[in-house]
Image: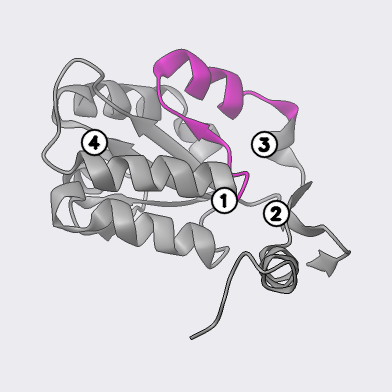
Amino acid sequence: MALNDEYVEFTIPKQKTIALIAHDKKKQELVDWCLKNKEILSRHFLCGTGTSARLVCEHTGLPVKAYNSGPLGGDQQVGAKVVEGKINFIIFFSDPLEAQPHDPDVKALLRIAQVYDIPIANNLSTADFMIHSSYMDTEYVHRVINFDRNVEKRVKEGHLVEE
């Protein structure tokens, strides 16, 4: 991680840690996608939320570290790992046609992936484009806003006042 004034550089390694998540009506689609891309996925570390992780592991034989299910905090666990720099790629087959009881958690995960400039696919075609990208087999350096510097600047300008 290299610092400069406005940005921090992060490196997504050649061997990525990929979170696999799917809403209930998209779980079979995720399993099928993982089977189709098993060879590529086998070269990376996999994790996922609750049932999604279990189903991918059972049906593909790929090792998948399981977090809690989404409604029980799994999306938040994945988001925390993104912030820690431990998850750097997300496949999240969301169901746009059904309300989710943990929708705020889903939105928070999507937001944190955007803030930390993490590749995230929310549908099959995007997942296909990402997994077959030439970046899958290389390191990828990307820039993220230097949050410490940003906070210092806002305090200096009077936008944040410490109590």
- Dot in front, 3 or 1: 1
User: Front-most of 135 and 75?
Assistant: 75
Is residue 67 rendered to the left or right of residue 136? left
Characterize the local packing of mark 2: few (<14), some (14-19) or many (20 or more) Cα atoms within 10 angstroms.
some
How far across and down, in percent of the image, does residue 63 sit?
Answer: 36, 53
How far across and down, in percent of the image, does residue 135 sit?
Answer: 73, 34
How far across and down, in percent of the image, does residue 127 sit?
Answer: 49, 24
- Quickly name the residue at label 1: 88
Q: CA distance from mark 3 to mark 1?
A: 11 Å
Of labels 4 and 2, earlier in sequence is 2
How far across and down, in percent of the image, does residue 145 sit?
Answer: 72, 54
- Quickly name the residue at label 2: 13
Query: Is residue 46 in view?
Result: yes
Marks 2,1: beta carbons within 8 A: yes
User: Front-most of 138 and 146?
Assistant: 146
Q: CA distance from mark 4 to mark 1?
A: 24 Å
The local secondary structure at tag 2 comes to loop
